[in-house]
Amino acid sequence: MGSFKYAAIAFLAPLPSLLFYLSFLHHYRRRSSPSPPPSDHLWGWCFHHPLLLANVLFFANVDVLFWLIGLLLSNHWLIDLYWTVIPVMLVHYFASHPLAKADAARSAVVTLLTWVWSVRLTHNYFRRERWQWGAREDWRFNEMRKEYGRPWWWISFFAVYLSQQVFLIGICLPMYAIHSSDKPWNIWDSLATVACLSGIVIAYFADTQLYEFVIRNETLSKLDAPLVPNLDTGIWRYSRHPNYFGEQLWWWSLFVFAWNVGQGWMFIGPLVNSLCLAYVTVLVERRMLKKDHRAEAYREYQRRTSVWIPWFKRTSGAPKAKSS
């Protein structure tokens, strides 16, 4: 019953912004005059400021409404799920806005790629959560709740939600650039497409191998058998965080589309995302080292294995015994 309640909340939560935007499109399309509406009216402002409108809808519907839902449920799980959905909503928003102009091939390819990325990440989210809705929130939010104590109720608005607006709108800026230029498709678009797909594939295999490792250890734990201390096979043999590498490759490759249409300043989005993942990497590795059954093995893993970019193993560095 609880899972059904959370599923209903997940589907109903974005309705305010969806209904508002559909109302705007309906109002614009039913106008008898082909000229844009005056900017001093509500619909005119929505017409002339697509990027600002996206931010206003995000602030009202995600920052405020999702935050209030999280307070009522004492669980901020909803934003984690919508990380996988909001980019799809944004790419369709930018593509459907009346001011949009884009090369048809570039728009179609980026929209399809965003859907593929979203399906992969959504599948991984529900697989990790054992196909339940709202079962738990991100472990980092739990740690912050313990760290901040009573003030967490208002700190969470900034730490969990407002910060997500900066990250998500920032890394999705290339979707806006793509739908603001009708420059013809060229070789850079082809290279960006291949790189985007590579990032999605790497992240998929990395997450699948991690999931299988976790399930294997859960089975061993139930049998009271020794746990495997560390994942050091497959892609994880060459990178300590190949899932993060795949995710960054996707977002940086998406930026290439924006750079190719003359919006190079949008590198700020994937850069902020990479800095955030660098911080998360530190948190994850500290957490791994706190677990007694794997601390020693993980330190050796750190010494020999690349952090993000898959690369060959380094030598252990342990001194060799002298032959007599």
Image: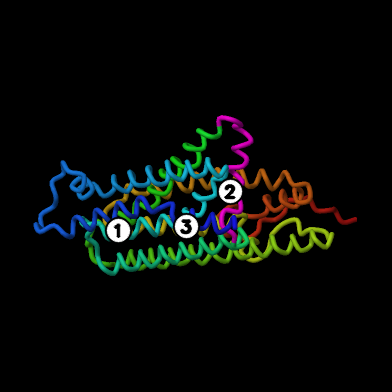
Q: CA gap, disc 1 to disc 2?
A: 38 Å
Q: Could you tell me how far apart the alpha carbons at marks 2 and 3 are, in whole angstroms?
A: 15 Å
Q: Nearer the viewer, mark 1 or mark 2?
A: 2
Mark 3 lies on residue: 84
Residue at horizontal 67%, vertical 54%?
Answer: 304
The answer to whether residue 39 is magenta is no
Residue at far top of view: 151
Q: Position of residue 297 (x, y in %)?
A: 75, 52
Q: Earlier in the sequence, mark 3 or mark 1?
A: 3
Q: Residue furthest front?
A: 1
Find disc 1 in the rendering and name its residue: 260
On residue 137, the disc is 2
User: Magenta span has 144?
Assistant: yes
Left or right of 157? Residue 223 is right
Residue type at mark 2?
Answer: Glu
Q: Compared to 132, does 59 lie above or below?
A: above
> Residue, x 9% and y 57% (percent of image)?
33
Q: Which residues are magenta?
A: 132-151
